[in-house]
Structure formats: C-alpha cells, structure tokens
Amino acid sequence: MSYQDLIVEVHDKVALIRLNRPKALNALNDNMMNELGEALYKFDADPAIGCIILTGSEKAFAAGADIAAMVDYTYPDTHRDNYIGRNWEHILRVRKPVIGAVAGFALGGGCELAMMCDFLIAADSAKFGQPEIKVGVPPGAGGTQRLPRAVGKAKAMDMLLTARTIDAAEAERIGLVSRVVPADKLIEEVLAVGKQIASMSTSVAIQIKDAVNRSFETTLSQGVSYERQLFQSAFGTPSQKEGMKAFLEKRLPNFEGL
Ligand code: HXC
C-alpha cells in the first residue's frame, strides 16, 4: 500500500513507518493521522510482523500538530469534528510493541505522539518539548497526562509551563527515552532492537505490553493479580513449552508463529 504522508518499509519481521511531510517538519495533519492509523492496524493484524517502529526524518520526528491547518478552527468545529479524539489515538489500540525512533524535533503533538509509543530510542540530535503555550493552547493529545507519568511533576510542569525544549541527554536522564544513540545510527540501532523483540514470542510481548500499560490505570494489587493470571495461563501456551524446553536442551528457542 502506498501513502501520501508516510513511507512504509518492512525489514524481516519489523515494520518501519516513517512520517513524511519534510517541508513542514512532519507537522501532523488529518491525512497523516488517518494514514498512520491504517498502517498501524495493517501491521498489527499481519502475523509476519512482530514489532513496529515509528520514526520521522533526521530533522524532525514531528514539529507538532499542523498549525496552518488548525489556525482558523472554531470551537464548534473542534467539538463537532472531535478534533484530535477522532484520529490521534490509533497507536494506543495497537497490541504489538511500537518503538518510537526520534531524531530532531519532537514538539507539541509530536512529543505527545512519541509518548504514545511503548518506548522511545532517541538520536543524540533529538529535542523534546511541549511549546503549545507559546501558540496559545494547552496540549491536546495527552501531554499534560503522559509527560508527568513519564518524567514526574517537576520536569513536566517546567517543560509545559515554560515551553522549554530539552535535548536527548536530558530526555534520557529524566526517563523520557530509554536509550540515546548517534544520529547516523538511529534506524540501524532501532531496527536491531525491533528484530530482537520480533524474534521472541509475539503473544508474550503483547501480554507484557498490556500488563505494563495496565499498571498506569489500576491499583498495585489489581495489577499484580492480573500479571499472575497471565503468568499462570502461560503454562497452557506453546511459547512456554518451547522457551523452557529450549533452555534445558541448551538450544536457541524457535518462537516462529508464536
Ligand atoms: C505547521 C510547521 C510546524 C507546525 C514547522 N512548520 N512546524 N507548520 N505546523 N507545527 C513549518 C514552518 O512553518 C516552515 O514552513 C517549515 O515547517 C520549516 O520550519 P522553520 O520554522 O522554518 O524551521 P526552523 O527555523 O528550523 O525551526 C524549527 C522549529 C519551528 C523550532 C521546530 O518550526 C517551530 O517552532 N515549529 C512550531 C513548533 C510548535 O509550536 N509545535 C506545537 C504546535 S501546537 P515554511 O512554509 O515557512 O517553510 C500542537 C498542538 C498539539 O502541536 C495538541 C494536539 C495534538
């Protein structure tokens, strides 16, 4: 399938989705968000894919929601059309792991979209920020909710209220990204991480992602109880039989199709 605002590739069992509106630093518009949903759902349903990577260009993951497209919106328009709600959260419905690979600017809606990924690997050129206050609006795609959960209240309030941009080193230090790699190695490194994930059991990866995400929505005891049910039910799966037997037989496990 070809897209107007995305470039999509498959590398072994890893799907790479690249946001592609270079002239506007990947400013996120309706068409791009609709296409992103289509691509994500297609790969989530494809049994040959075990991990999805979302990236942008060397200069920008995404510099925010498209300001030119929204400047003349009125409140009745945004409410009636369910602006943002209608097509920005597809990524949250994807069951397979989604890694965000961020180079350059991840600002406003770009930072919010990145935070919807399961984890982020940043190029040393990455810059994160929530500068919405400078264009007269609060964040609208989870910035006030996911940023404090990711980095704590102090850093989140600082970034959201001052609109200051942080670099990759600070993003790693405060826990917004899991790793920082040289910019010219970003895709190579993230593909290697994606292939590592995709080489193991996709069913187990889906369970882990589900349980971790649940930890942000539930109490500790309910979360641990859910995890225990997943663990106990694992003994009825081929992943457990293959994984544990392979260890005892001193061979590599084969999780193909699992
Ligand atoms: C529309 C954008 C854009 C955006 C950049 N461009 N960001 N267009 N929406 N968010 C366009 C510019 O207008 C310009 O187009 C081209 O991309 C290159 O940008 P420059 O500003 O010339 O580049 P540079 O000087 O390198 O500065 C880069 C930048 C700056 C620091 C990232 O572009 C910038 O501040 N962008 C806006 C960042 C922002 O405020 N994001 C939050 C948006 S609000 P032309 O045609 O002039 O070449 C938001 C709300 C989210 O995201 C809430 C719900 C999701």
Image: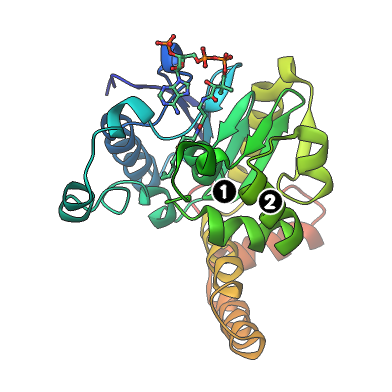
State the image coordinates of residue 122 (x, y, percent, origin top left): 70, 33
Task: First in sequence, mark 1 or 2: give its number.
Answer: 1
Taking depth in this image into account, of 60 and 1 the one nearest to the observer is 60
Mark drawn on residue 174: none
The answer to whether residue 51 is seen in the rendering is no
Apparent side of residue 3 relative to residue 120 in the rendered image (left or right): left
Cβ at disc 1 under 8 Å from ligand 1:
no
Q: How many labels does the image show?
A: 2
Q: How much space separates mark 1 and mark 2, taking CA atoms?
A: 32 Å
Q: Which residue is drawn at 44% across and 56% down?
A: 95
- Give me the residue at 76% from left, 33% from top: 168
Residue 111 vs residue 98, the one in the foreground: 111
Under mark 1, the amino acid is Met
- Which residue is denoted by mark 1 in the rendering? 115
Q: Residues within 10 Å of mark 2 (few under 14, many from 20)?
A: some
Residue identifier under label 2: 253
The answer to whether 258 is drawn above or below residue 99 in the figure is: below
